Amino acid sequence: MSKGRGKPLVLIADDDAATRYVCSESLRHEGFFVLQAANGAEALDLCTTKVPDLVLLDVEMPEMSGYAACRAIRATDACAHLPVVMVTSHDDRDSINLAYEAGATDFIAKPISWPLLGHRLRYILRSARNLQSLCETLDENRALMAALPDNIFVVAYDGTIVEHLRGDAAPVFDRGQQVAGRNLADVVPDDIRQQVQDALRQLDRAGGCLAIEYRDPSPADPDRWYECRFVDHGASRALAIVRDVSERKHTEARIHRLAYFDPLTGLPNRAHFRERAALALEQQGDVAVFIIDIDRFKRINDTLGTVIGDETLIETSRRLRSLAGQLKREFAVTVPDLRVELACFGGNVFAFMLAGRIDGIDLASIAARLGQHLSQPLFVGGHEFVVTASVGVARSPQHGDTVDALTKNAEAARHAAKSEGNNSQRVYRSSMNSGNQVCLDLENELRRALETDQLRVHYQPKYVAASGELEGAEALLRWVHPRRGEIEPSVFVGMAEEAGLIGSLGAWMINEVCGQIRDWRSAGLKPGTIAVNLSGREFIVGDPFRSIDGAVGRAGISPGDLQLEITETVLMSDIRSVMAALHRLHDAGFSLAVDDFGTGYSSLRYLQRFPVDVVKIDSSFVRDIEHDPNSRSICTAIIALAHGLGLEVVGEGVETAGQEDYLRHAGCDVLQGFRLGKPMAASAFELMLESGRRKGGSQGRPATGLLVPH
Ligand code: C2E
Ligand code: CA
Ligand code: CA
């Protein structure tokens, strides 16, 4: 019904005036407005100007027949959907067909039953209105679907594509443009064909909604993901909605990466490792967990900077990956089900897991290989250096039957390894169980030790190689624990660095040594130059110059009485303040020695840039001097190069006559080691100084025949 009219408007087109009259009277009586046309042309004109709600069109009219008029009315924009009822005197099939072909909505045969006409027309109007609103809904739906970026297929449950609405963002499966009429299964990428067929079958059976996700099959776009969602559409049809879900997939992948992977190395994190190890434990039974800790990593970070620190961790992860690959190849035959998993637990701690029939694998030797593999020289940011790793291992079922127990015990083994010095590996033993706790306790106890006089200084003499005269001593810290006895500095110095206690420890040490030198000197003894070890951390967290210079000043000794030992990594640091502190110390008259030389960097050129006076050849080279030609050539090279730079060379860790001889003949200036004198308490060193004085002149090394210098 046209808006505002209230009653429906019917146009009666008939050339017979009497029929028109009766018809309009009858319809007015039934509550219709009526318009009349005497021929086809007039009817067409009224249709476009007045737009009635329904047209009653006589088939037989002169000039323009009812059929022609109907076609003309349908052809106008305004009346394309107008209900047109043909009034025909023939009720034969042909004329009815002709009426429909001309676009008629319905027909009424003459003679017309006047009492029923109104009802009939009302019924036709109602279905026309329903049809109209259906068409509008369809148009709306179509517009909506067209506005979506998705590709929408209307499919029959056998897969036939009834209609395809192409969205602009999502792709059509790349099988040609025209897909309507084809089967959806023939249009989708091969990988998901079966899934599509199954989905349609399931939808047909149970209705509802199903989705399949798949990757773009074109190799050019492997990062693009689509979702094909099937929705039951009623009337034995389904909608298949294909949508580009790449963004969601990428976000999901990012969240997954963040939740499950270490961002720096890209290795699985602790949570992920836990899941994988639990799965391996469930599926494969035998699992070994290795926990790996890069030794003294803090020192790398502090002295070389975090960029180099990060690179070191990344390189470590690469090495672990390569070892994982090697092991898989090696055990391909003997342990075909071998599974290797890696993880980074954050910071400098890594995990390595072996699962499968691993009873034949020697875990201690794998741990040793991990250590070896990681201690190959590193080339990072123009620096060459070596890192070592402490490794602890635990395996199921002997050391635990859950991932947490295995990890915890492997950690305990790693702690035990670390307490034995760097670059150690240990398989778990139950006695290690409280390892972590021991460490924490020790840390607290070290704080107390600083206040309660549990620390001591031992002095290890150093001798001039050529003359055998006492050159001085190296001061070495000792912790005499009231219950545990003497604790190695390699255990507690690292701990003090990590616990932020190294500043106090260093300050205590330097005060103690300065006071001792003052006492000896005022007693007329000549202890030579006393070397004190400085931790790299001391340069970072405080100003070593201030505390050292202060201690020397308070004791009233001269800076020349002290030598400060620093390791190569401290020199390597690009931190300006370290360089400035070294210069300040050197300018003030302290002599500087590079400790453990040869272990960190293979190049001596760094030495040129620093104000150092002494190089101490690392004891590992001295140890192997007698049987390893390589160590011999390293020692000779260090001596020659250091002398070339005007530096003095100290050989450390001299234990045998052979080592002593070799170093002396190679031109090493000063010797230190158990063979010449072990570290001793201050009182013992004092006795040595006194006996030297009694003998007159300079203190030589204890004459034991064999030990007399040549
Ligand atoms: P280091 O500076 O390389 O000290 C030399 C170490 O070698 C000492 O171990 C010494 O006892 C040992 N040694 C000397 N001669 C021989 C020998 O002939 N054979 C063998 N096998 N060893 C020998 P120690 O006293 O256990 O010290 C270990 C490390 O702890 C030191 O290595 C040093 O890095 C650190 N340390 C010691 N005292 C201090 C300190 O006061 N401050 C700092 N920051 N570190 C210290
Ligand atoms: Ca030293
Ligand atoms: Ca050393």
Image: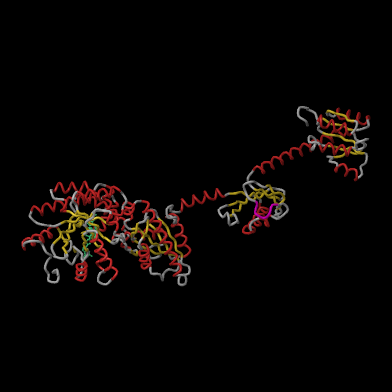
Q: Residue at x 18, y 67 (%)?
A: 675
Quick check: can you spot residue 618?
no
Q: Is residue 685 left or right of residue 306?
A: left
Q: Is residue 3 left or right of residue 596?
A: right
Q: Is residue 488 left or right of residue 251?
A: left
**Where is residue 12 drawn, in percent x and y?**
87, 32
Is 105 situated left or right of 387 in this image?
Answer: right
Magenta stretch: includes residue 239: no
Which residue range is magenta in the image?
172-177
- Number of marks drawn: 0
Q: Quadrant of residue 389?
A: bottom left
- Percent across and percent down for residue 46 are 84, 30
In the rendered structure, does residue 176 fall within the stretch colored magenta? yes
- Residue 622 higher or lower than 80, as above or below: below
Q: Position of residue 257 (x, y in %)?
A: 47, 52
Residue 429 or residue 626, whichever sits in front:
626
Quadrant in which the N terminus is drawn: top right
In front of the other: 311 or 322: 311
Could you tell me if residue 355 is visible in this image?
A: yes
Residue 391 rendering spot, x and y as whole percentages: 35, 62
Picture quarter with the C terminus? bottom left
Q: Looking at the magenta stretch, what is its main secondary structure?
A: loop
- Coloured how? secondary structure
> Where, by quadrant of the figure, is residue 647 drawn?
bottom left
Front residue of this view, candidates 84 and 591? 591
